[in-house]
């Protein structure tokens, strides 16, 4: 395969940091991804060292796209929900580039990256109108599209739900931490989706994150949501693919 068809994507999450070269013609990983656990505390220095480890695992020396679980403007973190607060104000693009020996680096919000990949290669492909891609993991990430165009950094996981941040009630991690049944968790998710539907009236919800592999266990339990509700096609690789797409766009 030609090197020019591939760009490296790395997905920084609250529990793991994973990456792989991406075949941007197919919208899929070119090699099996490599994953390391997110250090605790998840400080910039510790996390960026893990990013270097993931990239060097493949001997990669070209452009790199990286996701981050927070608001990103011009490569700099403006929020940090599920990682150390010392990230706020950090120029992630420069920090990662320096650790990778000056390689070109592009950084974007993790859910935005997953959403871009799903819209181009996955469950949102060819869809118009308003589409909301949600990533259910350590928190809840969101990516909102109107006629295929991204509204960046929406952070809808922090909307209030039952007096709490939505992601403190309905994330995949909360389901595990509180040992909720699929039915209990689906009920919480249903309330959250109904709230989003009231605000945005989307035609389609795409449900991503690692738990999307088990979509058959909870999506059929969600009732009363008018929008179409589908699992992410790229599942938990969407962030890696979207990161690589963003790096290609800025190369």
Image (cartoon, grey):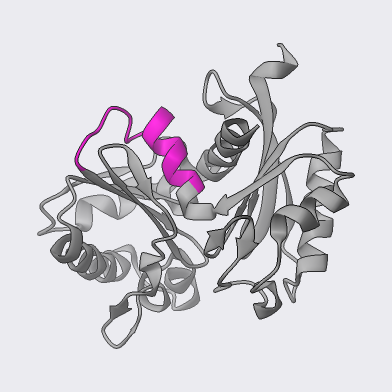
**Residue 33 seen by the camera:** no
How far across and down, in percent of the image, does residue 33 sit?
69, 38
The furthest residue to the top: 1
Residue in the image at 70% along x and 17% along y? 4
Q: Locate the N terminus by quadrant.
A: top right
Identify the image quadrant of residue 188. bottom left
How far across and down, in percent of the image, does residue 173 sit?
49, 69
Residue in the image at 64% along x and 74% along y? 88
User: Can you say whether 219 is above or below 90 in the image?
Assistant: above
How far across and down, in percent of the image, does residue 181 sit?
34, 68
**Residue 49 seen by the camera:** yes
Q: Is residue 132 left or right of residue 234?
A: left
Magenta span: 113-129
The furthest residue to the right: 101
The furthest residue to the front: 74
Q: Locate the C terminus by quadrant.
A: top right
State the residue in front, 63 or 57: 63
| Residue 125 magenta-highlighted | yes
How far across and down, in percent of the image, does residue 131 sit?
26, 46
Number of on-image labels: 0
Identify the image quadrant of residue 237. top right
User: Can you say whether 7 is above or below 204 in the image?
Assistant: above
Identify the image quadrant of residue 196. bottom left
State the residue in front, 64 or 102: 102
| Residue 197 magenta-highlighted | no
């Amino acid at each position: 395969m030609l090197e020019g068809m591939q760009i490296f994507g790395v997905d920084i999450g609250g529990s793991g940091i994973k990456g792989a070269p991406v075949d941007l013609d197919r919208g899929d990983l070119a090699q099996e991804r490599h994953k390391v656990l997110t250090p605790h505390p998840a400080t910039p220095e510790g996390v960026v060292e893990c990013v270097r480890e993931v990239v060097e695992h493949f001997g990669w020396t070209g452009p790199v796209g990286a996701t981050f679980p927070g608001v990103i403007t011009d490569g700099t973190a403006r929020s940090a929900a599920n990682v150390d607060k010392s990230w706020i104000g950090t120029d992630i693009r420069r920090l990662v580039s320096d650790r990778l020996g000056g390689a070109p680096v592009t950084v974007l919000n993790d859910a935005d990256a997953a959403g871009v990949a799903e819209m181009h290669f996955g469950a949102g492909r060819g869809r118009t109108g308003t589409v909301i891609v949600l990533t259910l993991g350590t928190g809840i990430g969101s990516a909102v599209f109107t006629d295929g165009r991204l509204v960046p950094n929406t952070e809808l996981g922090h909307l209030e739900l039952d007096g709490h941040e939505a992601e403190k009630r309905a994330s995949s991690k909360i389901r595990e931490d509180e040992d909720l049944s699929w039915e209990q968790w689906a009920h919480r998710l249903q309330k959250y989706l109904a709230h989003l539907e009231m605000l945005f009236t989307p035609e389609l919800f795409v449900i991503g994150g690692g738990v999307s592999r088990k979509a058959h266990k909870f999506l059929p339990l969600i009732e009363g949501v008018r929008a179409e509700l589908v699992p992410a096609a790229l599942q938990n690789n969407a962030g890696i693919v979207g990161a690589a797409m963003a790096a290609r766009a800025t190369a």
